[in-house]
Each structure stands twice: as C-alpha cells, then as structure tokens.
Image: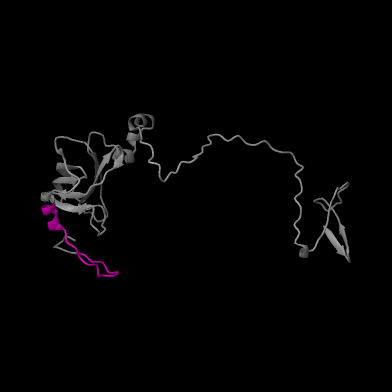
Amino acid sequence: MSVLHSRKLFILVTDSEGKPVPDVDLTAYSITKKFGYSAPELPYLGKERKDKVVINNFSFRDLKPETHPGLNLDYKEWELLAGLDSIEYYRFLYPGNKLYRFEYVPEDKLTQFSPFVVRDGAIQQIHVIYTDSRPVYFSWSSNSQPYSFRIDSGYHNIKLRMTDRIITIDSLYFNPCEKLVFSLNYDLEQKNIRIEKAEPKLSIYEKSALYRYIFPYRDTFGERYAFIQQNDEI
C-alpha cells in the first residue's frame, strides 16, 4: 500500500492479515508519463522448474499436406489388426470380390439407388449411369441434383460408363420403398457383372444414344425453381 503526502511517498508492506512484514528489501521509484519511459524488467529469483519431456512429438518439416498424395492403406494387414471389416465405412470402400449392398427406408419411401465404383479404397468417377439402357445421370450435366436415382422395384440392368471401361450389372434386385447404396471393385467380374474396355472419348454409338436425352436451355428463372414433369416423373 502506498500513501502520497505532498511530495513524499510512504510505502507500507503488510501480509495477508494486514500486519507489517519485517526485513523487507524494497526498491521503488516513480516517474511521469511525459518522459515516455518503460519500467525495467526485474529478474526472476525463484527456482527454475525442469522442462517436461514430450512424448510422441512429431514435426512435418517441409511437408505440405495440401499437396501430399497421402499413403495407401494396407487394407489386408489392418483388416486383421484393427478389424476394419466390421466397420461399415471400410466395407463400403473395400467390397472385395463381391457387390457391397446397404439398404434403408428413406423418408419419401421411394425406391432408389446410388452406385459407386472403388479402386484400392478410392472412389472412381462414373460419367454415365444407365438403368435398363436408359441414361439417368451425366457427370458433365450443369443442373445439380442429388446423387440418387429413382427406379421401380424388382430386377434391373445397371450400366456404369467409366473413363476407360463399361461395367454392366445384370439382374440387380431392388427392394420396394428402399434406397440401395452399392459399391463394387473396379475390376470385379462375376456371373452377372461384365466389364468391357472403352476409350476415354465417347464412341459414335454412345453419342447418338446419349444426345437424345440431352438438351441445352437458358436459365432465365432467377430464384425460382424450374423443372420438367412427365406424368409422375420429375
């Protein structure tokens, strides 16, 4: 506590109970702000503590995560060590030599599906999706829509046009009022699954078949939604 009387400064040092503290070594000074002077730093006279030893300390050095391609998962090894085959996410990305299926009842109870093709755990680009030889999805289409496609229940033929191959799944069954999410390996061939090599460019036959389902239009709708309806199809 300090008390200023006239031009003299009296300093009283007390403990937490307000009693005077004996044998105090105290240094005090005062100065006005017009001198632009900063108080000096006082030395630390306490005991220095030992630094903690950091365990599992890692540094990236010059590694740039945004440009690093990452490491491929050794699925066969970690499938046993971590039980990855019991996790739905990894069952979807690593379907092995079978077709992965996941089905559930959506809120609208419409029969629909979402197909995926994977290669070493990475999802591959599908450019065209056909249902019973009719295209229902184009990767280059500018009108955004959910990646889920309505279909009647029962058996159907599904064809997936990739960059360098065409995957045809014959007699794929769809349960009524359920959504089917399925995935399959890039090179999976079974009794009802056929793979054909294809060029990165569409063939003349593919163009003639696809262009009947594509037309350009000018968006003059502003904030309003535009749609085309044919019977109960939108």
Viewer can see residue 55 = yes
Q: Is residue 23 left or right of residue 160?
A: right
Viewer-nearest residue: 158 or 220: 220
**Which quarter shows the C terminus?**
bottom left
The colour mode here is one colour
Viewer can see residue 174 = no
Q: Residue at x 78, y 63 (%)?
A: 35
Quadrant of res 189: top left
Quadrant of res 46: top right
Q: Taken as a whole, is the magenta stretch helix, strand or loop? A: loop
Q: Position of residue 45 (x, y in %)?
A: 77, 42
Viewer-nearest residue: 37 or 111: 37
Q: Position of residue 188 (x, y in %)?
A: 21, 36
53 to 202, vertically: above or below: above
**Which quarter shows the N terminus?**
bottom right
Q: Position of residue 196 (x, y in %)?
A: 15, 40
Where does the magenta region start and end?
207-227
217 to 156, vertically: above or below: below
Viewer-nearest residue: 204 or 157: 204
Viewer-nearest residue: 162 or 156: 162
Q: Residue at x 30, y 37 (%)?
A: 120
Q: Residue at x 26, y 67 (%)?
A: 225
Quadrant of res 162: top left
Q: Is residue 208 magenta?
A: yes
Q: Residue at x 20, y 65 (%)?
A: 217
For the image, the number of numbered tags is 0
Q: Is residue 81 magenta?
A: no
Q: Is residue 38 left or right of residue 221?
A: right
